[in-house]
Image: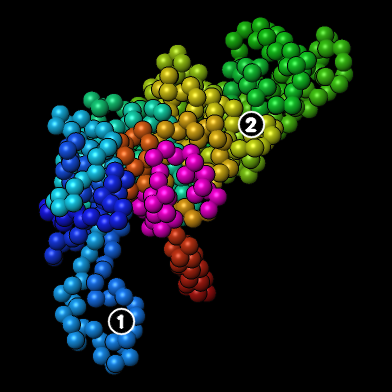
Amino acid sequence: MYVGTVISTTNTPSTEKFHFVLAEDVIVKKGQFVVVSTEEGKVVARVSDIIKTNPYFERADSVKEFERSGKSLSELFPSERWEYLIGEAVPLGVYNENGELSRSFVPPSPGEKVYLAGKQEIFKFFGFDENGVCLGKVLHHDVEVKLNITRLLQKHLAILAMSGAGKSYLTTVLIEELIERKEEHGKIGIVLIDTHGEYVGFTEDEKYMDKTYLVLGKDFKIGVPSLSPQFFAEILPNMTAVQKRELTRLLAYIHEEKKGKPFDLTDLMEKLENDKIIKKSDTRNILYTYLSELNSTGLFGYYDNPPLDKLSRPGQLTIIDISDLTSQKEKQIIVSYIGRKLFEARRIERIPPTLLILEEAHNYAPEGVKKENAISRGIIEKIAREGRKFHVALCLISQRPINLSTTALSQCNTHIILRITNPYDLDHIGKTSEGITRDVLKIISSLQVGEALVVGEAVNYPLFFKVRTRKSKKAERGISLEEAALRFMEKQNKVSEDVKAFM
């Protein structure tokens, strides 16, 4: 659709920006995409602003003088006829005559016609995939945002937004798409660390309950026989080389003694207590204290729960709901174990390609925090660096990207950003997300709930979109404050009515 004509201003048209006067009775919105021809080919541009102007009102002194006369300009002159709109557009890329996409090196000429970008042009320009996951629609365009899962997930994904901006909602939509994915297009396993119990609605929804496996924090168990000295060293970062050496020896000894039979930390502590080889009592006592503290968490047992064969299955969502745990250390131990277990299992291809989703990721891979307070950071950064080689993908969700490990975040080649207003976080995003310009950064702080920006590997160019409506049931803990208050009052009123009826 024809929407306007390129005009010449002091500094435009240029390769970075051009202006066009809008045709009569045409509506163009900020954020829409337009197309204009150049010597290179078809340039696709994003409308960065809409300006309304009128030459009769350009001089403030003239307008003021007419006001003093008691008459308006519109009464004396046909000023309304001279009001018009000017669009400001930022060129993103150009298609040459062979259909190849590249940067634009030649500005459009003044007088060139500007057209609204069509569905197929937008679909092709941003690199959408017909078999991809549909997260919503391009803002101001009736075009579905269908992202190829390899481009979106293989090199990891970060979802960043302030609290209440729609992070969990968007994640729910992504999970729905991955669960419903057709077998011929490839199904992956999905493992979600649910910090606040916001995703248990999947287990209550008839459409998804048979494809969802839930494990509560209190039921989660780490099988001691499968643990390596390296894992103990990871969750006990203050352990010395001597202590690690003795623990390695004790583990080998108890494995040999049990001959395949299960054992737990209590058994290991008993062996430590009766061991005759350890000469220094300090080494024995400190090791015993470490193991006793781990045992008191209740996380360790004879067998894993969930077992590996249930943890990751094609097209299945496994929710590890740790909202019932209060200790941050216990939560980090769970994340560390799950991450290591998935990584090692994928190296030998015992499980399908898997996506590990971490809610409140800044709590599990914090930046600038000592090792003893960041037990799970090591494995998260390892998966971020090496996971793509073994098809273990990360989705890091955070409301404080500035507090999230720079190593982990920098390895996330796709960022989906919802509303963020904190200036420190915005500055951090501007430095860590490639392709975000100043005008895009300004829009992020004014996004409405459910509006998002995707930038990076998954799309050819930064793109704003509206997240689609979720299909799954909302969890009780995910309801609004007003709804929670109403439900509480309903329960109270029912109790009162039951008491009156009994009396």
Give the image location of residue 305, x and y in percent.
53, 28
Whether residue 374 sits left or right of residue 119 in the image: it is right
* Residue type at the position of mark 2: Ile
Which residue lies at the image location 62% right of the left edge and 25% below the top edge?
301
Dot 1 falls on a residue whose secondary structure is: helix
Magenta span:
423-452
Whether residue 140 sits left or right of residue 448 in the image: it is left
Decide: is 78 above or below 249.
below
Decide: is 390 above or below 163.
above
Q: Is residue 287 magenta?
A: no
Q: Which residue matches tag 1? A: 63
From where the camera sits, is residue 464 visible? yes
Q: Give the image quarter of residue 487.
A: bottom left
Q: Which residue matches tag 2? A: 375
Which residue lies at the image location 23% right of the left edge and 55% below the top edge?
8
Which residue lies at the image location 27% right of the left edge and 56% below the top edge?
9
* Residue type at the position of mark 1: Val
From where the camera sits, is residue 138 visible? no
Give the image location of residue 55, x and y in percent.
24, 72
Whether residue 423 sits left or right of residue 106 in the image: it is right
Dot 2 falls on a residue whose secondary structure is: loop
Q: Earlier in the sequence, mark 1 or mark 2?
A: 1
Whether residue 293 sits left or right of residue 448 in the image: it is right
**Distance between the alpha carbons at the discs numbered 1 and 2:** 68 Å
Count residues near mark 1 (Cα–Cα under 10 Å), then give few for <14, some for 14-19, many for 20+: some
Decide: is 238 above or below 66.
above
Task: Single out the residue that lies furthest toward the bottom.
Answer: 70
Closer to us: 468 or 145: 145
Q: Which mark is residue 387?
A: none
